[in-house]
Image (cartoon, grey):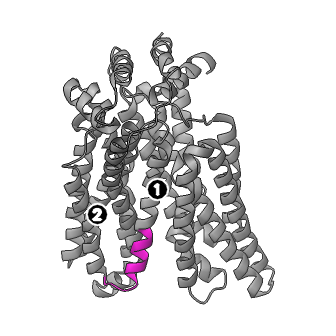
Amino acid sequence: MAAAGEEEIARPLMEEREHPPSFSSLVVVVASTAVAVSGSFEFGCSVGYSSPAESGIMQDLNLSLPEYSLFGSILTIGAMVGAISSGRIADLIGRKCTMAVSDLFCIVGWLSIFLTKELWWLDLGRLSIGFGIGLLSYVVPVYIAEITPKNLRGGFASVNQLMICCGVSLAYLLGAALTWRSLAVIGIIPCLLQLLGLLFIPESPRWLVKVGHHNKFEAALQSLRGKYTDISQEAEEIREFTKSLQSLPQANMLDLFQKKYLYSVTVGVGLMVFQQFGGVNAICFYASEIFVSAGFSSGNTGTIAMVIVQIPMTTLGVLLLDKSGRRPILMVSAAGTCVGCFLVAMSFLLQEHEWPKEINTALALTGILVFAGSFSLGMGGIPWVIMSEIFPINMKGSAGSLVTLVNWLGSGIVSYTFNFLITWSSAGTFFIFASICGLTVLFVERLVPETKGRTLEEIQASMNSFSSDKI
């Protein structure tokens, strides 16, 4: 019954005529998105920090390799804790306040690393940063999806991944010239910029109407759509859809597994599982080691080449997302990661059969670059875009927590097991990754809906209706 009601409310949205956004509305949306993705840049800096800082921290603090490995991996533990609470916090205090809380946790963490003389302060700082970026990984794409017009939503939301990529790249590049303590200070800058920017951008209109702040809701929506734009129809549609959802019982994570939400959960969780188990963190965290194992004298050349490839490919994905749609880019991206992993696997396989070193290194370099470029094109950012679109406002907190937790859990599992797998069989490990990437193409083709050009209410009503009717 609830799904049918949602469909009735969403039907007028499907008849909505396209109106080009005004210049003033674009300025506000761009500015709001820029502030939000400062958190994404912080995310990237945090993830990229451990690789260039490794030798300096181990030498200055006299750490063993297992001790440093704990420092690197504890970020994932903090992020999982942040992910579990992210949806609830964002629903309770709002999208803007959640970003501010995450910034404070990251600042405390960076200061702890900068000032540390003891291992436990180092780990505590890294754990605090992990909690902060666990919150950011959920709230940033959700906020962007909730403020942008439907015809621009995909491109704006995918800027999240572009800024993560830029943050990782900057950490790699600056890490070659700065000490690890100086690099920790650099990590504070995006947090301060976001905290300042949050003072000037509007809260998510959909969250405001959900918590009953109707006057603030209209003011926020008006600023996002332009001073002279008639927002009455859109405002009424959002109110009616939210009211229909709030008439349902208070949602918790177990409610996600009701039949009407099962399709959305399958898509959201499935995309995160395939994203992580396709091997992205194994390749990002251990790129240098992979290049050396494949026959390179040093991993620096390959790592720099990855940085050069990732940013333009992520930018291309941003530009194409609202033109080509989510599904085609996802399938091309997943197919490319499959080819990349297959080439790396063949490099190791031929190395075992003593083929010439030049062939092995060329295959490894080509494979890693194909993987990195393909992943940056779509699989890196689009799952987060879709996650922010497919869950209704009453389930978004619980669903976002679940999906983000699955993502970070997968990241931790792959990061932890990769060294064991590569010892077992280098070629076999990448053949496994290639197989998972291939299955991703089938998963997208069979189950993932196209959300381009549709309002959030349209998407959510159609998915809930599909679950009730088909599953």
Q: Are marks 1 and 2 in contact (CB under 8 Å)?
A: no
Does 141 appear above or below 49?
Answer: above
Q: Say what secondary structure mark 2 lies in.
A: helix
- Confirm whether the magenta stretch covers residue 298: no
Residue 168, picture quadrant = bottom left
Instruction: Kindly tell me whether residue 168 is visible in this rendering.
Output: yes
Q: Which mark is residue 161?
A: 1
Q: CA distance from mark 1 to mark 2?
A: 15 Å
In this rendering, would 106 be left or right of 310?
left
**Magenta region, residue range:** 168-179
The amino acid beneath tag 1 is: Gln
Name the residue tied to disc 2: 190
Is residue 172 on the magenta stretch? yes
Residue 66 in sight from this viewpoint: no
Q: Position of residue 107 (x, y in %)?
A: 22, 63
Which quadrant of the rendered structure holds the C terminus? top right
On the image, the x and y values in percent for residue 360 come to: 74, 80
Q: Nearer the viewer, residue 443 or 37?
A: 37
Q: Residue at x 53, y 48 (%)?
A: 382
On screen, 224 above or below 296? Answer: above
Q: Position of residue 358 (x, y in %)?
A: 75, 86
Amino acid at the residue labelled 2 = Pro
Q: Nearer the viewer, residue 468 or 6?
A: 6
What residue is shown at x 55% (from left), y 44% (from top)? 322
What secondary structure is the stretch in magenta mostly built from? helix
Q: Is residue 277 above or below residue 94?
A: below
Q: Is 321 situated left or right of 167 in this image?
A: right
Q: Quadrant of residue 342?
A: bottom right
Label for residue 349?
Answer: none
Of pointers 1 and 2, the one earlier in the residue sequence: 1
| Residue found at the very far bottom of the displayed protein | 297
